[in-house]
Amino acid sequence: TPVSDGERVYVFFGKTGALAFDRQGKQLWKHSVGTESDPQGWGSASSPIVYNDLLIVTASAESEALVGLNKLTGEEVWRQETSGLNAVWGTPVLVRIDDERTDLVIAVPEEIWGLNPATGKLRWYCEALGVRSFCSSVVAHGGVIYAVESGPGGGGGIAVRAGGKGDL
């Protein structure tokens, strides 16, 4: 699913990379975020999201990473790599905590993470569902994160309040 900031349209095509287009369809930039394959061979499913001057991409299959790109140039601003992302297909959500803080929230196997979207640094995490992969995107409402997943190794649902610090 593409995303737009009203001036540009951004897409993520897995191994092809993240791309930006103007509203007339002219390609403005292209940036590779990795060329690996996930163990299942499924490829990516997450959509890119825009946060301020960043395009945030979940390159789980391509490089086991969340990547923040400058939305005007495509240059990499930050990258957080971890094997915990190797089985993630959901799109992260932005959760506004207050006037000064927004959390980037994503569900991964066995945990939910809240990160600083400007830097990619982990702010909080919590033990979640005992699943080996997380295909669903989390949903946020009223500062509460809801995650539901099923599959081999467990499943179920969990709700956690965003905005914490460390191990929730």
Image: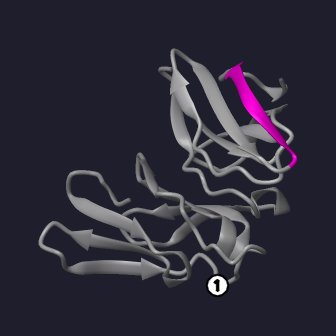
Q: Is residue 145 left or right of residue 26?
A: right
Does 103 sit above or below residue 14?
Answer: above
Residue 117 found in image quarter: top right
Nearer to us in this view, 163 or 70: 163
Residue 154 covered by magenta stretch:
yes
Q: Which residue is mark 1?
A: 35
Q: How far across and down, in percent of the image, does residue 79 sit?
A: 67, 63
- Residue 140 seen in the current view: yes
- Residue 96 seen in the current view: no
Within 10 Å of disc 1 (Cα), the crowding (few <14, some 14-19, many 20+) is few
Tag 1: amino acid = Thr
Nearer to us in this view, 159 or 75: 159
Residue at 74%, 60% in the rendered image:
87
Q: Quadrant of the N terminus?
A: bottom left
Residue 133 found in image quarter: bottom right
Nearer to us in this view, 41 or 80: 41
Which SS does the magenta portion mostly show? Answer: strand
The outermost residue toward the left is 24
The outermost residue toward the top is 142
Q: Quadrant of the C terminus?
A: top right
Nearer to us in this view, 88 or 21: 88
Q: How far across and down, in percent of the image, does residue 62 sit?
A: 65, 75
The residues colored magenta run 153-160
Q: How far across and down, in percent of the image, does residue 85 sit?
A: 75, 59
Residue 37 covered by magenta stretch:
no
Residue at 49%, 83% in the rendered image:
16
Residue at 69%, 78% in the rendered image:
41
Does 45 sit above or below residue 27?
Answer: above
Q: Is residue 151 left or right of residue 96?
A: right
Residue at 39%, 74% in the rendered image:
19
Q: How far across and down, in percent of the image, does residue 129 sit?
A: 81, 36
Q: Which element carries disc 1, helix, strand or loop?
A: loop
